[in-house]
Image (tube, rainbow, N blue to C red):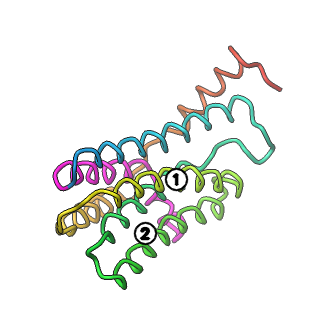
């Protein structure tokens, strides 16, 4: 396995869904309940919009280089960015906040780069994934950072997330084929475009 393949595997649903669930459980226990709902809303927005666009673009591609917005990119930016926002929230010292946010963004952007470098997505598809993930992350961050929080150690969430990454790295959920099939059906049965 090459470095880029190993990097891109951190953006697979098999890894991101359990980390998302760990974040949700942590928020339910450590934050006001409304914050967990905003995390869930951000996840549904990110995943739903990405999957919906994949189906639509498989059915009727709007451009030659646009068939499938990068789900790895969108969800990685939301999940790793969300994890970084939670870990970096005050009262974390400023220098640690900078490192944590930079690390979360670097991982998400590295996954985005790997999708293009491995020819799994075009630059445009990856840019759309970044836009979807960025909008979802902004929604969650805005709500999370606006809520009062008691100083709660974040290390259990980081430890569980790290364990998930170690155990599940390399596993894959093959949702893309299913979405492609739905798009093909939509193309033939309903839209009949192009």
- When asked about the image quadrant of residue 38, the answer is top left
Give residue 104's mark: 2
Q: Is residue 157 above or below residue 92?
A: above
- When asked about the image quadrant of residue 44, the answer is top left
Left or right relative to 11: residue 33:
left
Q: Which residue is drawn at 48% across and 50% down?
A: 136
User: Which residues make up the magenta segment?
Assistant: 1-30
Disc 2 residue crowd, few under 14, some 14–19, many 20+, Cα 10 Å: many
**Quadrant (top left/top right/bottom left/bottom right) for the C terminus:** top right
Front residue of 91/190: it is 91
Left or right relative to 157: residue 61:
right
Residue 53 is situated, as x and y percent measured from the top left of the image, at: 62, 37
Front residue of 39/163: it is 39
Disc 1 residue crowd, few under 14, some 14–19, many 20+, Cα 10 Å: many
Q: Does the magenta stretch include residue 99?
A: no
Q: Which residue is drawn at 64% across and 55% down?
A: 126
Residue 146 is situated, as x and y percent measured from the top left of the image, at: 35, 58
Residue 133 is situated, as x and y percent measured from the top left of the image, at: 52, 53
Q: Count every numbered label the image shows and give the total.
A: 2
The local secondary structure at tag 2 comes to helix
Q: Mark 1 or mark 2, which has the lower sequence index?
A: 2
Q: Residue at x 59, y 28 (%)?
A: 181
The local secondary structure at tag 1 comes to helix
Q: Which residue lies furthest to the top in this view?
A: 189
Residue 175 is situated, as x and y percent measured from the top left of the image, at: 49, 38
Q: Which residue is drawn at 69% across and 15% down?
A: 190
Give residue 133's mark: 1
Left or right relative to 140: residue 93:
left
Main SS of residues in magenta: helix
Front residue of 72/141: it is 141
């Amino acid at each position: 396995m090459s470095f880029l393949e190993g990097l891109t595997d951190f953006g697979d649903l098999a890894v991101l869904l359990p980390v998302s669930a760990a974040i949700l459980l942590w928020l339910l226990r450590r934050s006001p309940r409304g914050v967990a709902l905003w995390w869930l809303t951000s996840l549904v927005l990110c995943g739903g919009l990405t999957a919906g666009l994949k189906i639509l673009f498989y059915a009727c591609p709007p451009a030659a280089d646009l068939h499938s917005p990068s789900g790895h990119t969108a969800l990685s930016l939301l999940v790793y960015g969300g994890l970084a926002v939670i870990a970096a929230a005050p009262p974390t010292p400023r220098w640690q906040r900078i490192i944590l946010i930079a690390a979360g963004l670097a991982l998400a952007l590295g996954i985005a780069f790997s999708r293009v470098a491995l020819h799994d997505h075009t630059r445009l598809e990856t840019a759309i994934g970044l836009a979807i993930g960025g909008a979802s992350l902004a929604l969650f961050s805005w709500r999370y950072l606006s809520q009062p929080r008691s100083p709660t150690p974040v290390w259990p969430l980081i430890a569980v997330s790290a364990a998930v990454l170690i155990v599940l790295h390399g596993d894959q959920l093959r949702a893309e084929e299913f979405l492609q099939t739905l798009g093909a059906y939509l193309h033939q049965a309903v839209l009949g475009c192009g």
